[in-house]
Every structure is written in C-alpha cells, then in structure tokens.
Image (spheres, coloured by chain):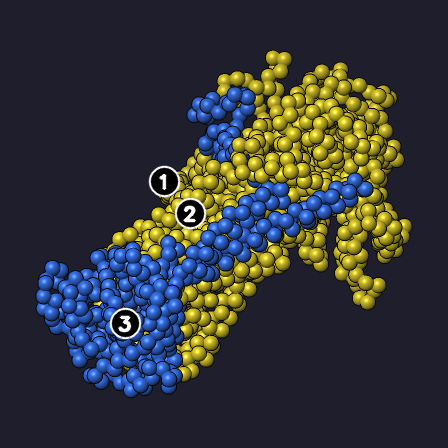
Chain colours: A blue, B yellow
Amino acid sequence: MIGAMMASSYNEDGHITVSGPGGGTLRSKKPENTAFKQQRLPAWQPILTAGTVLPAFFIIGLIFIPIGIGLYVTSNNIKEFEIDYTGEDVSSPCFNCSQSFSWNSTRPCTCVIPFYLEQPYESSVFMYYGLSNFYQNHRRYVKSRDDSQLNGDMESLLKPSKECEPYAMNENKPIAPCGAIANSMFNDTFELFYNDPNGTKVQIPLSNTGIAWWTDKHVKFRNPGLNNPNLTAAFQGTTKPVNWRRPVYELDSAPDNNGFINEDFIVWMRTAALPTFRKLYRIINKTSNMVPTLPRGNYTLEVVYNYPVRSFDGRKRMILSTISWMGGKNPFLGIAYITVGSVCFFLGVVLLIIHHKCGNRSNSADISN
Amino acid sequence: MGLFWLRKPEFYWDINLNHDMLARNPGNRSLSPGSTMLINYLASSSFSLTVLFCLSLSLRLSQGYEDWLRHKADCSINECPVDVVQRGKVVRTQSHKLRVGDIVVVREDETFPCDLILLSSSRHDGTCYVTTTSLDGESSHKTYYAVPDTMAFRTEQEVDSLHATIECEQPQPDLYKFVGRINIYKDKEEPVARPLGAENLLLRGATLKNTHHIYGTVAVYTGMETKMALNYQSKSQKRSAVEKSMNAFLIVYLCILISKAVINTVLKYAWQWSPDRDEPWYNHRTENERQRHVVIRAFTDFLAFMVLFNYIIPVSMYVTVEMQKFLGSYFITWDEEMFDEELGEGAQVNTSDLNEELGQVEYVFTDKTGTLTENNMEFIECCVDGNVYIPHAICNGQILSAASSIDMIDSSPGGYRRDLFFRALCLCHTVQVKEEETVDGIKRGIHQGRPTSFYISSSPDEVALVEGMKRLGYTYLRLKDNYMEILNKDDEIERFELLHVLNFDSVRRRMSVIVKSSSGEYLLFCKGADSSIFPRVVSGKVEQVKARVEQNAVEGLRTLCVAYKRLSHSEYEEACHHLTTAKLALQDREQRLAQAYDIIERDFVLLGATAVEDRLQEKAADTIESLHKAGMKVWVLTGDKMETAAATCYASKLFRRSTQILELTKKRTEEQSLHDVLFELNRTVLRQRSISGLSVDCLDFGLIIDGATLSAVLKPNQEGAGPGNYREIFLEICRNCSAVLCCRMAPLQKAQIVKLIKASKEHPITLAIGDGANDVSMILEAHVGIGIMGKEGRQAARNSDYAIPKFKHLKKMLLVHGHYYYIRIAELVQYFFYKNVCFIFPQFLYQFFCGFSQQPLYDTAYLTLYNISFTSLPILLYSLVEQHVTMETLKKDPSLYRDIAKNSLLRWPVFLYWTCLGVFDAVIFFFGAYFLFDNTTFTSNGQMFGNWTFGTLVFTVLVFTVTLKLALDTHHWTWINHFVIWGSLLFYVIFSLLWGGIIWPFLNYQRMYYVFMQMLSSGPAWLSIILLITVSLLPDVIKKVLCRTMCPTATERLTDFFLLCSFFSFLPSRCTLMDHHNHNSHHPPSPSLLSPFFLFFNFLSSLSPLLLLFPPTAPVCACDSALCTRSLFLGVTAVHSPVPYCGAVHHLHAFSVLQQNEFLIGPERGERSTKRR
C-alpha cells in the first residue's frame, strides 16, 4: 500500500512531496500559477496627479458653466406669482375668515382677494397651494395611512391598519380613508376670475386632471368594490374622516375622480419632504397660441376658507407658476452649476500655479542634494 | 474578544425588535409602550432581522469554518476503531469509548488513540519505534521503552492479568516531559515501583512504526487531556494594531451615536414645548401614547433615535474585515514565490487575524541556526590535542567509506587519544540508523554494492559529526541490544555497552553517554559547547584546543568540544545511583536530574574539538539588507557562541564593515562593572548622535550582548535606589543600534527580550522568526510569530502565526504581502466609517426639518441594503486585490515600507479627515437636495414630489458618491474592480427600478411605488445628482492632488516616476538603468511635467486603459540607450547640462531619469553584492 502511494507521488522533478501531517494524502502542494492567485491580474493603474486632474478640472469647468447659465436663464424666464392669504393681518381680506374659524360651522367662509399680474403668462399655468410650518413629514403623520385600504382592499376598508390610530375608527365604524393624512386633507377651494378691462368678471377654467402621478391614480389608488359604479354602496359600513365635511364618495361629481381616486386626495396623500411645501391644485390649460393663458391685468381670487393653520403658526399661499423643462422657478440649480464650474476652473488655475512652482522647487531641491 | 462587547448594544436593540415583532400578530393589539416606537423603522421589513441573522452568522465565518473542519476531524477520530483487551480478549470498540486504565493494542502504522504507557512490544527488547510527525514534524523514528516488568508479556491473557496502579502528574502540554510512577502488585507482595518518563509515554497522534504491535494502557490522558489536545488549545489571542485602532474609532462613533441621540431627544422636547407643535390638530397621538409618562416617552424617543442612527456603527465592517482577512490570507498560501521546491511546501497561514500586522513590523527577532543559516551541517574538521584532521573528500550527504581519505594537516602520531576521540564521537550521540529502505522499488542508499544506512537525528550537528567520523574511518553501525557497534578503521567491529545517556538540554548545553567497553572499562564521553566543557576539564591540551575553537568560531563554524572521563566501578555505581533516584522522583524530577548530571559530568579530560559549518541560507543577506532599508531593526538571538554568531552576522550583512560594534559581554563586564559599561556605551551612542546631527546613517551601531550579561541587565535592581534602572539604559542603547546580536541565549531569554522591547515606551510591533523548539517561546511572545519549516521539527511552524519555508521568504511576506494587507485594511476601515457617516448624517440633519420625529429619510429597504448589497462588494474586493504600487516596486525599494510605519494610515488625523469628509459629503447631499426641493417643483408637468423622492434622491447621490470615492482610491483596476464597482451601481439602479416598479403584495405600505422612476424622469434630478456627486468628490480629489504635489510619500514619488518610464517606453530601444546605489538621497523628485504636451499625454494616459495597461512585471525604465548612458554619465559630472541630441522630449526628462536611476535596481544587485563578499 505504501509502495503504491509513493509511486503516485513523484512529480516531474523527482521530488517526493508528502503533504499533510499524517502523510495520508499525497499531492503536490505547489500553488497554481494563475494570474489571480499570484496577484498579477492585468490592471489599469491610473494615478491622480496634478497632470491628470488639471485637464479634468478645466473640462468640468467648461461643461458646468454653460449648463449653469442655461439653467439660470431658464429659471429666470419662469413666471411665478404668489399670494399669502392666511389672514393674519387685519388688513387682509381673509382676516375675518381666519378669526371666525370653527370646525363645526356649516356656513363656508369666503374671502375675495384681488391681485394684479404684471406680465402675461404664456403657455399652461399651474396653480398650487402652499403651506408653511405644516409637518407632513412628521413620523407619526407619515405612517398614519393604510395603503392597502387605499388600494381598494375590502378587508382593510372595514378593518383599517392600526397605523391609522387614532384616526382608524370613529363611533365604532371604520374610517375611510383612515389615518391622519387623509383626515387633514386640504379643503380650501380656489376660484380665479379675470377682471376684464371692460368691467366683466371672467371665470378662468381650472382643470383638476393630471395633477396627480399617473401611476398613483391608476395603480396605487383604487376604489373598493372594483367596478362597482355605485361608490356609496362600496363604502357601505364606513364613516368619513372626522374633519371632513363630506364622505369620500362625494368628493367630486365625476365618477372617475371620486372616492380614493380623487386627484386632490391623491396629491394630498403624497406627503411632502419639508415643512414648507406646495402642492399642485389646478392646471390652467393653454387655450390657443394667440392669447396668453393669463393676460396681464387684474384678477380676483375667491377662496373658500376652510383650512385652519393659525393654531400651529402656519401660512397658506396660492401660487401661479409656469413650468419649463426643468420644472418651476428654482435659481439654485443654475447658480450651483455656475459656482461649481467656476470653482473647478479656478482650482485648475491654482493647481497649475502650485504645481508649476512646486515642481520646480522640488526639482531644484533634489538637484542641490 | 474586543469587538463583542462593543457590538452588544446593537444586538440588544435588535433583539428587542425581534421580540416586538412577535408581539405584533393580529389580535394582540395591546403593545408594550416602548415597542411601537422601535418597530416602525425596521419592523415592517423582515429584512433587518434576516440581515442580522446573516451578520451574526458570517461574523464568525472564518472561525466557524475552521471549527467545522476541526469538528469533522474530531468526529472521524472519535469513531475510529480501537482494539482493547477485555477479559483476556481483544475487543474492537470506538476510540471515544476508551477510558483511563483500558489496555489497548496498537498495530504497525496505526496511530495511538490516546496517551499510552508502553507495557510490552512485539519486539523482544521491549522497544518500539514511533514517528511523531503529526505532533512535532520530526520524521525520525523515536524509540520508546516498555516498562521493564511488563515487557515480557506476550499474550492478551498475560497483559490482562496485570495488576498495577499508575501515578502521574496533571496533564500538561509539553510533549517531551512526563513524570509518573507505576506500582505493580504481584501476589500480595509489596508493590514494585518503576519510574515512568517521556520515553515510556506513547503520545496520541503519533504512529507506530517497524513494530508489529504493542500493548499499552491508557494510563494517563484521554480526550482533551492528551498532550496533543492540550497543544491544540488556542494560543493567547493576538490582536493587531489595526484592530486596536478600529476599536478606538468605534468607541468614538459610539459616542457620536449616543450624543446624536441625546441632542435630538433634548431638541425634540425643547421644540415640542408648545402643544401646537407637539400635537397640532392634524396629527394627534393615540390615547395610549398620551397617557405615557413623559420620562418613558423621552426614553423611548432616545431609543428610537438610537435605532435610527445605529447604522453609523459599521457592524458590517467587522464581517467584511473578517472575510477580508480570511480570504486575503489565501494569497499568502497561493504565493508561488514562497513555495519551496525542496520542501514541497509553501507558506502557511495559521492565524489570518494578523495579516496587516505584517506591514507594521518594527523589530525583527531572528534565530540564527536554521533560520539565517541552512541548518545543513557539514563536518569541516576536528582537532585532537591541537592536531587538525580534515576529511578531504567532502561529498555532501554521501558517505565515502575509504579510510584513506584522511588528510592530516598535522600528522603527528595521535595514537590512543586520537582514536578515543573518534570513538567518543561515534558513541556520544543519539543518532539512529535507518536501515536502507525500499522506496518505489528503487534501492536507495546502496553505495558501491554494499548496503549502507542513513543516520537520523533530531539534531543535524550530530549527523554531521557521525558522518564526518565515517569519513575519517570510524563508522557507527547500529545500536543493538544496548550495544553500540562501531566499525573502526581496520574494519573491525567494536562493541560498547550503552549504560546511560545523559540527554542534551539547552541549559547544560552538553550531553554524555556512559558506556562499557569490551575490555570492561567504564567510560563517560561528553560533548558540548566549549563554555560548558572547559570549566569541567581538569587535564588535556586545553590551550591549543581553545585557540583552535576560537579560530573556528571566528570563521563562523559551529564548534563542539569533546571530553571523556574514565570511571571506576564504584564511581559508576555511584553515578548509577544518582541517576536512578533522580529518575524515580515524582517531584522536581528535572531539577534532580540536572543535579545528578552536574555531579556526574565533571573532572573531564579534554580530547578535542570539532567544527561544523552551517552555511547561510540563500539570500539571507539580501533579506536582512532589505529589512534594514525598510526601517526595521533586526536582532539576532542565538544560543551560539559570540564569535560564531558575529561571523554569521557579518556574512548576513547584519553588521557591515562600517558598523561600530558595541560589546556588552561577560568578558567586558568582568573587567568593568556592568554599570560602567552600560553608561559608557550609552555615552558613545549619544555622542555619536549629537555629532552626526541630521544625517543619521553615516555611522551605525551594532550591539553584541550575551545571555549572562542580559540576565544581569534585566535583573531587577536590588540596590533599590541605584542610579536608575539598567533596563532603561539598555533600551536606550538598543534604540540607537541598527542591529543587535544576542548570543548565548536560553529559549526563555529570547522571549524575555521580545517582551522587553514590546513593553518599551514606543510599543513597537515585533516579529519573531525561528525554526526550532527553542524559538517557540519568542514566537508566541512577539506580535507576529513566524515559523520556518526547518529541519528541527515543526514546533516552531506549528506555534507560529505564519510559517514559511525559508528565511528569504520573509522579505516578500513583509514588504509585499504585509504592505498590501496594511494598505488594504486601513482603507477598508476608514472607508467603512466614512460611508456610514455619509449614510447617517443626512438622516440626522433631516430630523431638524421633520420636528425631531425620528422620521427616516430613506426607505427601509435602502436602510437595510445599503451596507449589505449596495456598497459592500466594491470595498471587499478592493481590500482583496488593491495594489497601490506593483509588487516589483515594493520588493525593489524596501524603503517604501517606511511609508506605512507606525500605523500611519489609521492615525487620528487621518481618521478625522475621513470623518470630516463624510460629514462634508453628507451635508452636500442633504442640503443639495434640500435647496432643490425647497418650495418648488422639478417636473415638467408641474406635479410634486414627496418625502420619499427626497430621500431617494439623497440616497442615489450617496450610493454613487461613496462608490466613486472608492473608485478614486483604487490604484489597481483589474476586471474584478470594474465588475464590482460598476456592477454594484448597476445593481442599485436595477434594484430601485424593481422595488418601485410593482405593488409588492407582502408589504403593507407602497410608499416607494414609482418613486425612483418618477425621479429619473425629471431633468433637474439628473442634473442635481451629477452636480452633487461632483461637489462631494471634489475636496477629496483636491486633497489627493495637493498632497501628491506638495508632500508626496516615497511611494507616490515612485509611481510618478514609473509614469515617466511608461512614457519613455514608446521609444524603440530599451536599456535598463543600473544602480549606483546611494542610501542618502533616496527620493526621486516629482518631475516637472509642465510641458503642455506632457499634460496632454498624462491626461490621455489616465483616461485610456490601453496606454497604461503595462505588464506589471519588471517595470524597466526604458529609454534610448544613448540618452541612458549619457544621463548616467551626467549624473556623475554635470547635472544641469542639457542633452543636446535627445530631442525635445528627452530633454524634458533627462534629469528625472538620471536622478531616479538609483532606485532602479536590477535584480542582479542583491546577488552581486553577496558575491562580492
């Protein structure tokens, strides 16, 4: 047996290699000569030296500055108009409404705010409402919803998730839609009138479609009872959120904008990232190329003032804005691009100088050695 | 384990979570107060639990794997069959059923299942042969002896009738020590007591050879008490410096975590002071929550913040570090260059925990024999009474039987004394004769038709001596029935009865035998180190021998002295008595034996001395030189004589001709007091230092100290308030010496020295390397212990952290592997902290904008997968394959090792830089996104994004930045790096698309639905992602470039230079610049590359992998040969003169090349200089 084992153990050098302390297994232990095992994989070895980086800096500078200028110009071309209608101030038209607010008042309080647009708004105009100091991103608030209920799940409709607490049940009936977010849905309404120079008041048509994400409206949010055309029946056994005036199935008259798939509701349900935020309210579609969507002139905004913000020092705004390919007015991005581009360019120059001086110095130092 | 207690808080929280998860099942609506807070982050995903499970699983991955292997081996051993004698019959059972006291039958080639006392053997003389290869690696057959009273037992019945008790010491791991006593009861007589020693104890794991079968009792130890098992017990855990700094960093981060949580909790309550903020009408608490006491609420808030920010503690770092170490250590075992053809073995890694410590070594303690030298002894000469004999036919390893080959330099009739000397050497040894063996059917060892035999011994010196004697005409034939047979030069067989062997030990440094010649004379032969023989000699030509011994020692030969003593019968009886009583003693047997030996071994007559050469190992000098250049201090610790050792040190370039040798030896301290010597040396060293000032290495010191002086130095100062501690002065001297030689060291002293240096105030990292059992103590003591798979068994290799076949492999081990591992792990550690700061700091900032409500910025899936999938693989693979410079560069320029000395990449400033970079990046991510989101829209259809898009934007920038930061740090882009870096970015994108792409039925929230896609559909999001990534990477790039330009490290200078070289390689003809090595000005300048052409080239080459895809092997500086010689010439004469005909490009770089030529060292350099010597 030993003989046989030994015989197999000759490698080409004629050396006997015995491996393992017991000499049980006999095999050559010589490591394989592969590039990986010998750590000799072919490799690209870039080095970050001033020489390699300098051109990159200049190139970044050259690319970023034009982009930044483009962004800045685009942003500046966007027209935006904002009205704060909170009614803190005595002179404000909404002062009375804000003072006389109570949850169970049945008579809506309306305030009329005139304003003047100095420039005509071409193309489509987007109408936003803005809230400040409203913590939609508070953890307790963010989680207070039941996505499966909103997706039309019957079981969750009648038995809302406990995440919705304390807005899950009211008078032993499940709330639909449950949770703090739904309960606090923004319910001011706006109407916009153009005061024609000849004295007539023209109402501007506001479109409420296309304000929510397509996927939200068509996939994520669904009414219960699938194709049941009778929403009232589908929501049988549930109750409206405490702060709502109307149940969810009466949010809108159009059947494809009612119940959970009401776009105002969907927009509200997408919680904002920061305590000062705006949400899309309506779109004023462009009618023709000839007339601007909103010509220069006097306007009247009629607000049905329902939403209380004074208790938490909040502010309410109405914003009219046009949109470019890069969204709304935001000079930050353009300025940032210009700044970074210039900094890179500047750094390139500085590095060039330093490198020049330093290179010379170290060279001469070494020579003197 | 240092890391476990730190990890504990993590586990604690998550176990809490786990508990809450269970409580969450439907129906159970009443939750414990604290739980809801905690649940909300992680509970909804079962990920984090799975992940934690995976973490804890893989945490001990490597150890677990080793454990599993061990377990498997254990099982197979436990179940292997064993024959036991029961009621007079042989019964087969399983080895784990063996009990102490069983009698076991072991047959040839079987392994002993436990520690056995040999009762009887099938050999008539009651001996058996055993190999202990698996225990200590010695392949020689060792002889073990049966208890005399039972050696006659032949059958199972006889063995079974034995009635005896065995007393023995407690189990202890020393393989070569055993003390016991067997009391044999025979028919109501008084029991007979017999001593049991290591020679009676068959060790578990050893194998029976050349003996048909034996009977043994499981006398002593079974299972975990066997010596083998005791030896396998884990050694004291060594922790690397990196691990220590890692834990320190971790504590800092733990403090950051806690302070973050505290700050946020305090701010939260300050902010919530007004009830409208605490509970505005739109966001009420539940009744349950309201009723909770404010203290409990605050505490749960604190815990929730801890959970939210806990990712800042990089748990996954520990997993990655473990994996990196475990997998990375394979590169050592795979290294072909560290494979030794002769031994058929490559490097071994016994502990992967210390890989990076190999890059941090400051002191190297090396053994001499077998480590620096080959331990392949060759008999050179012997000197009898001043007459020198040299066997003239030196055939390495082969034995010539011709007696005529004696060439007497000094052929005076030596007569009786000479023959006695030869006989002494033939008798006084423990060499075994291995009969010629049939290997593969080829008879080996047949010489001139006559079968000869091999000598085997644990000491190569002895073999060399016996073989030398053979060449001088006296052949040792065999030991048969206690008679040693010698074939003398007249071809007659002389027989001596072997009475006693007084074994060699390293304290006595000698061994003796007592034999009885055929004429009835009792003779004691002793051979040993000169220092242990001369004091015991009473007559003989001491002076002549001493002179010769010293001369030989200076030449670096190993010398032994031989003496003898004639014993009268009564003297012999007395010696016998001393020995047997000592051997029988149960307590202090060692000590008593030593006393007995001391009494017996005195009043010698000096016969002569031998000289054996031990050649330096291949490339030992080159290796030591490299270690010196790498800034390491090399100490040689040897048991040898000072002269021999010093000669080796010169040969191995430890001392140069220019080295000023300081001696701290017994000889000197006898003349002056130790105190004076120490102070004088200290003064010399200090004076030199003050004179030389800046240029330190114009004169270096070498210190020689011997064991006796060392113990005097280390002895605690009895005088108490003496003039300070010698220890400190000694250390001060050592600190200023580049090389230290400690000779005449006992094994324990070696460890003491290592300990001394380890404990000195700089706490340097030490490495001990050795091959023999006597080096084990220092190997275990040093930070890194390296064993050489030498000829003196395997103890050193077994006890070491790494084992290498040859000393020369140490160079690659430290300079290449150590350097790489250190760079890799340092980056790994820093990067992990950095990426977790980047990850968590935005969450911290977000709390200021969400009312300190613990709202997570990122989705749960992102939180969980960030460290596990999105950013883990690139850094792991980076830490496995990164090479900041090529292997050849590291080997050629050992001084690069100094760049990483003293844990330079993990110092606090570096750590601070990384952390600040992390915070900066996090601020950029968060506020970049914040200003973008600030009260505007960035879609072209006017729709708004919510908080999850905000988080996803930050997270996308984060993942890209962090991965690209690693890409910036990567110097070595193999396909693996490309694959993992781009792959994990791609994975992130694909995962995000998928995660947001469908309504996941198992989730109870759909917050991520289409968020990622919507984000990508917006132009400004893209632009801001690009912008934020650029801004985050910018400071690091600038820092890198500035550091490189203003204060480059040696490594960076070198790589800059190779960039030049590759530039030159476009030119057709090549030449290699040879060095004129100059130690002083070692650094190439950073070349002035300001020609626009060069800038352009640089840029191109950095962009295109093709241009720089140079074979990493042999980066030869290639240039036009004319330019090459020219510039070399210029290097000597006028540096500034331009080289007119080299063209514009040549001109530009002429002097860069010629200044760098000194470190373009041809591979021949090392060898050349060795030859010169």
Q: In terms of image quadrants, where is residue B31?
A: bottom left
Question: Which residue corresponds to mark 3?
Answer: A198
User: Rounded to the nearest whole Å, what is the CA distance between mark 2 and mark 3?
Assistant: 62 Å
Q: Farthest residue in the front direction?
A: A198
The C terminus of chain B is located in which quarter?
top right
Question: Which residue corresponds to mark 2?
Answer: B985
Q: Secondary structure at mark 3?
A: loop
Q: Position of residue A15 (x, y in %)?
A: 55, 24
Q: Residue at x 38, y 65 (%)?
A: A119
Q: Is residue B968 above or below residue A158?
A: above
Asked if badges 3 and 1 are on one and the same chain, I answer no
Q: Is residue B484 visible?
A: no
| Relative side of B62 to B997, left or right | right
Q: Residue at x 72, y 20 (%)?
A: B394
Q: Residue at x 31, y 64 (%)?
A: A294
Q: Secondary structure at mark 1?
A: strand
User: Rounded to the nearest whole Å, what is the CA distance between mark 3 and mark 1?
Assistant: 119 Å
Q: Position of residue A199 (x, y in %)?
A: 27, 74
Q: Amino acid at mark 3?
A: Asn
Q: Nearer the viewer, residue B676 or B931?
A: B931
Q: Nearer the viewer, mark 2 or mark 1?
A: 2
Kindly identify which numbered label has been placed on residue B92: 1
Number of other residues with Cα within 10 Å of mark 2, as a class: few under 14, some 14 to 19, many 20 or more = many
